[in-house]
Amino acid sequence: MNIRLGVLRIGDVALASVNAEIYSTVGREFIERTPVADTLVVTLANGMANSGYITNDAAFGANTFQVLSSRLKPGCAETSILNGWLDLLQAASR
């Protein structure tokens, strides 16, 4: 599954993007981990990544529409997105 990530940093503002619809907990986790003072997460709705909803790992096992319709496996997307954003942010800070 290909999920596109991006980071744009302008001074003390960072925009982290993903071409999918993610659970807000994934975005909040990034905001808590980033060293940039003002960070926003920008997502794209309506399945552009063709992954279905991207839930946090803790949500797997719940019988919700978002989990049941997801094409992803637990333990993959949340960590990959967070680490990808952090790597992109580090590269943008050079």
Image (cartoon, grey):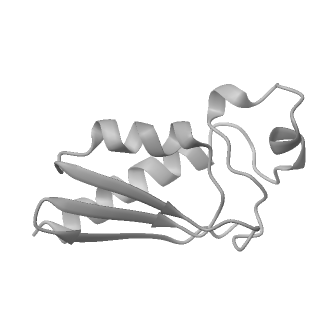
Q: In the image, 44: left or right of 79? A: right
Q: In the image, 87: left or right of 70? A: left
User: Relative to 40, does residue 66 appear above or below in the rendering?
Assistant: above
Q: Quadrant of the C terminus?
A: bottom left
Q: Estimate the x, y position of residue 18 in percent, counting from the top left.
A: 53, 65
User: Relative to 68, does residue 70 appear above or below in the rendering?
Assistant: below
Q: Estimate the x, y position of residue 88 in percent, counting from the top left.
A: 31, 65
Q: Estimate the x, y position of residue 13 in percent, counting from the top left.
A: 20, 61
Q: Residue at x 13, y 66 (%)?
A: 93
Q: Residue at x 64, y 33 (%)?
A: 57
- Picture quarter containing residue 14? bottom left
Count the labels in the image: 0
Q: Residue at x 29, y 53 (%)?
A: 39
- Picture quarter containing residue 71? bottom right
User: Relative to 67, does residue 91 appear above or below in the rendering?
Assistant: below
Q: Quadrant of the N terminus?
A: bottom right
Q: Estimate the x, y position of residue 65 in percent, counting from the top left.
A: 88, 41
